[in-house]
Amino acid sequence: MDETLVFRILATVLGLILGSFYNVCIHRGLTGESIANPPRSKCPKCGHFLSWWENIPLLSWLLLRGRCRSCRKPISARYPLVEALSGALALALAVKFGPGMKFAVYLAFSGLLTVLAFIDLASFMLPLWPMIIGAVLAVICAPLFLDIPLMDALLAAGLGAGTFWLVRWGYRRLRGIEGLGEGDIWLMLLLGPLTGVRHLPFVILASGISLIAFNLPMLLGGDKGGEGHPMRTPIPYGPFLCLGAMLAILVGDEVLGWYLGVLR
Ligand SMILES: [Zn+2]
């Protein structure tokens, strides 16, 4: 069989398996349990330990029709969603970069972004330490493996976080309410070194467009005034920033090339 095809299939399977691990990280991140203890997966509702065939990415959820075998309570659709997304991201990175360190490093960071995004979606909170450790690792990895010079990585971190800090400060001065979460500033510190300065505008633009697109039904249909006013309903921005960064990593060069071609 064609080597490229084999690599892409292996990458997808690896992504699906990693997705199961991300689910554990997301669940433990939300509940505050340790990642290491207990090592075996169990139903969060009844504590039933999962046997191997109840723990296969995607397939088990479909076989069990989204319910726990023991207590019959529904299993969140987040589990197969994270696994499918992780598999798709691994495949996309494999197609873009082929085998090598660039693929491996971006795969690892895509996992961190997936976990952060789903924790933010469920709790409106971004855990601080994983972002800080991730940002330090990203600055180290950028010149070594990602073809992004150290100064570029540092500048991207500073510019990204600085811009968001300014927007947050300005919004609070003008409107007197929080427009941006503090977590989003820390998140930019991590995303900047992964994309480099030249893709920062794309990350911000793509995250803004996807945020509006995903929330359009709520923004249009929300009742006017009071607590339920659509502009007052909190929307986590972190997941869309992570999405924007992944898009920049996957198609940023092509989009930038096309844009500069149009200008010419
Ligand atoms: Zn159960």
Image: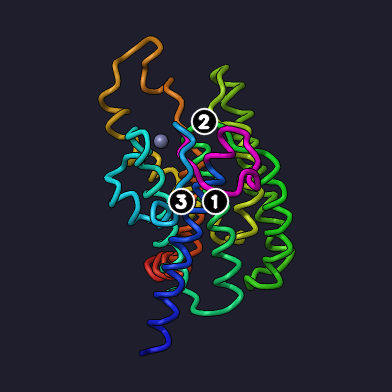
- Quarter holding the C terminus is bottom left
34 left or right of 175 in image: right
Which numbered disc, 2 or 3, marks the residue that appears first in the sequence? Answer: 2
Helix, strand or loop for the magenta stretch, by majority:
loop
Q: Secondary structure at mark 1?
A: helix
Callout 1: few (<14), some (14-19), or many (20+) C-alpha neighbours within 10 Å? many
Q: CA distance from mark 3 to mark 1?
A: 8 Å
Say which amino acid is labelled 2: Ser
Cβ atoms at labels 3 and 1 below 8 Å apart: no
Determine which residue is flagged by label 3: 243
- Closer to the chain start, of discs 2 and 1, is 1
Mark 2 = which residue? 123
Which residue is at the front of the view, 26 or 191? 26
The reply, left or right, for residue 153 in relation to residue 54 is right
Q: What's the image's color scheme?
A: rainbow
Q: Which three-letter amino acid code belongs to the residue tagged 3?
A: Leu
Mark pair 2, 1: CA separation: 15 Å
In which of the image's four quarters is ligand 1 placed?
top left
Q: Which residue is mark 1?
A: 113
Identify which residue is drawn at 68% across, 60% down.
153
Circle 1: residue type: Leu
Apparent side of residue 199 relative to residue 70 in the rendered image (left or right):
right
Report which quarter residue 53 is drawn in.
bottom left
Please tell me which residue lies in front, 16 or 93. Answer: 16
Q: Is residue 161 above or below residue 235?
A: below
What x and y, as percent, mark residue 49? 48, 44
- Give me the residue at 36% from left, 33% from top: 71
Magenta-tinted stretch: 27-45
Residue 97, given in percent of the width and then of the height, sits at: 50, 75
Ligand 1 within 8 angstroms of badge 1 C-beta? no
